Amino acid sequence: MKIYNYAAGPAKLPDSVIKQIQEELPSVHGSGMSVLEISHRSSLFENILEDAKNDLKELMGIPDNYHILFFQGGGTGQFAAAPLNLATNNHKIALLDSGHWAARAGDEAVKLGFEVDTLASTKDNHYQSLPHLPKDTNGSVYDYLHLTMNNTIEGTAYHTPEKLPNTTLVADMSSNFLAETYNVNDYGLIFAGAQKNLGPAGVTVVIVRDDLVHPVEKIPSMLDYNLFVKKNSLYNTPPVFPIYAAGLVLKWLKDLGGVSEMQKINEHKSGLLYDFLDQSQMFSNHIKPSDRSLTNIPFTTGSDDLDAQVIKAATDHGLMSLKGHRSVGGLRASLYNAMPVEGAQALVDFLDNFEKNNK
Ligand code: PMP
């Protein structure tokens, strides 16, 4: 039975990358040593790190005045790092409350003593559409606007960024990093945990504009952008294996034609599922069509019991990890970059059959 993994993260990696990891595991680049045991100060790892940076730069079109950094601590670590590094003038952040992860970012900043203004929220309609900036908001009182580009749990995404004049844009791209094209110049800071679209859990990518990087007093070294720039992400022992694996995924994406090609494939995959859901009498997705995510698609039968039956039957059929986040319920299919078109089609075929057999 062919297994497909629709988990929201850690999530599916390309089959060819898993195979390459397996083949190279005892001896990376013919060195006779495993990537699991090499020194982060070795030239072997230096090459792996530089390659990953160069490939990411090429794939995203990252301009020269941006730094590419690798942190530990996940997206959650960046909820603290972003205000500590960037909110040093006004100590004040603007936020659009588009879902669970946007709210968590706000909570972390408040916990650290920053002021957070939630300029708009769609909590009242269960985040089934995106909040937008109120007209005439004065951006100059804020150090930055925090935007969650793709709301992993709720299944919405900003396909073009909200822009607040006179302030920096900070983007959490954890769940649609490299899944659709964005113009890096629109952002002061982009961050993303690797474990959805880039690689295994354990590394977080930070892309930050040079003029925003400056010495900050009383900041933990592990969150300090200025220090990580100076040390080329090698202040302490970095997550060697996740960076190596992410590097392989970046090469896979380049071979596939880059981010714009990937976006077309992602639009096709998500289109297959949305088209099915929109005509189904049994299943539905409640998100406003223009705000729908390409990568995370929640849906439901409207009945908890029936949803549970669908999840059980899907699992028996090799379609794994379709349970929705506990805060939303229902089902959720994550169709990240590594999910092939056949995986989206297999899910649609299964749901269609389930509906026909359970009328
Ligand atoms: N932001 C978004 C959009 C996420 O989806 C997640 C995790 N699912 C996080 C932040 C938190 O990331 P982490 O678990 O890496 O701390």
Image (tube, rainbow, N blue to C red):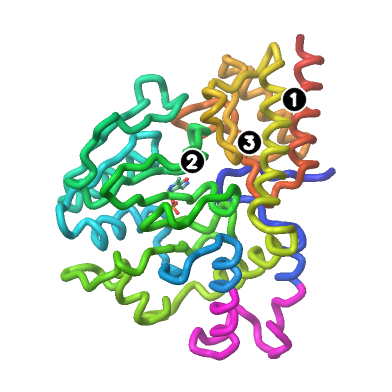
Residue at the far top: name it: 359
Residue behind mark 2: 160
Residue behind mark 3: 333
Residue type for callout 2: Thr
Residues packed near mark 2 inside 10 Å, few (<14), some (14 to 19) or many (20 plus)? few
Task: Relative to 276, say whether 282 is above or below.
Answer: above
Given residues 28 and 191, the one toward you in this image is 191
x%, y% of residue 17?
72, 64
Q: Is residue 271 left or right of residue 49?
A: right
Magenta run includes residue 24 = yes
Measured Cα–Cα span from mark 2 to mark 3: 23 Å
Disc 3 on helix, strand or loop?
strand
Residue type for callout 3: Ala
Q: Is residue 225 left or right of residue 143?
A: right
Residues packed near mark 1 inside 10 Å, few (<14), some (14 to 19) or many (20 plus)? many
**Magenta segment range?**
23-51
The C terminus sits in image quarter: top right
Disc 1 on helix, strand or loop?
helix
Q: Residue 69: which quarter of the image?
A: bottom left
Which of the two marks, 1 or 2, is nearer to us in this view?
2
Numbered circle sitting on residue 351: 1
For the question of whether residue 188 can be seen, the reply is yes
Sequence-wise, the earlier of marks 1 and 2 is 2
Residue at the location (22% across, 56% down)? Answer: 87
Magenta run includes residue 244 = no
Q: Residue 253: which quarter of the image?
A: bottom right
Which of the two marks, 2 or 3, is nearer to us in this view?
2
x%, y% of residue 10?
56, 52
Residues packed near mark 3 inside 10 Å, few (<14), some (14 to 19) or many (20 plus)? many
Numbered circle sitting on residue 247: none
Given residues 205 and 17, the one toward you in this image is 205
Task: Relative to 58, say whether 3 is above or below.
Answer: above
